[in-house]
Amino acid sequence: MNFSKKNYDFKQKTKTMSKTILLTLTLAITSFILNAQSISDVKTEGSTLTVTVTLRGSGGHVLVSLHNEASFMKKPLKDASIEINDGKAIATFKNLIPGEYGIVVLHDKNDNKQMDFEPNGMPKEAFGISNNVLLMGPPQWSDAKFEIGDKPLSIEIRL
């Protein structure tokens, strides 16, 4: 009878230990999942880029497009159509991941959302790129690229 009581006590202790281990594992896993979920729910904001375009002309809008190397002179990562006020147009791009970017700007005088050309192939409307490089042909990524870090950045492009 003594053996049976010891066996019963051993089984009870084993069940209690198993429940304790299971509860501890459940709490640890739940804590891990909740912590991982709260970390992923936090939106990390990237940098802000402010582009100020200065120009002599008026009328229409200024089209500002943000590119990386892969999208340069193709579909932009982000773009904006900005009204001209007192010879300036200001575009702001938020939540940018640090890296290399380039800006292409067009003064779209007739608001047709594209660059217009003379019969000889020369542009009718003013355009420019970041770094204010004087262009003697199509814009090149190497001329337009600049670095965005963790802090807000402001650049000016003159047309």
Image (cartoon, helix red, strand yellow):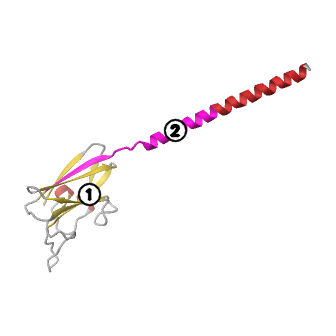
Percent across and percent down for residue 8 are: 84, 25
Residue extending farthest to the top is: 2
In the rendered view of the protein, which quadrant contains the N terminus?
top right
Q: Amino acid at mark 1?
A: Gly
Magenta region, mostly helix, strand or loop? helix
Question: Within 10 Å of the Cα at label 1, are there few (<14), some (14-19), or many (20+) other Cα atoms?
Answer: many
Query: To which residue does mark 2 refer?
Result: 34
Left or right of 75, for residue 114: left
Dot 2 crowding, Cα within 10 Å, few <14, some 14–19, many 20+: few
Magenta stretch: residue 36 in it?
yes
Q: Where does residue 106 sit, x and y in percent of width and height?
A: 18, 64
The amino acid sitting under disc 2 is Leu
Question: Which residue shows up at 27% across the image and 42% down it?
Answer: 151
Residue that label 1 marks: 102
Q: Which residues are magenta?
A: 24-53
Please state the horizontal and vertical placement of residue 57, each as a whole percent of the image. 8, 63
Position in image of residue 83 (x %, y %): 16, 59
Is 100 magenta? The answer is no
Task: Give the mark nearest the N terminus, 1 or 2.
Answer: 2
The vertical placement of 149 against 85, above or below, is above
The mark lying in front, picked from 1 and 2, is: 2
Callout 1: helix, strand or loop? strand
Most foreground residue, 77 or 36: 36
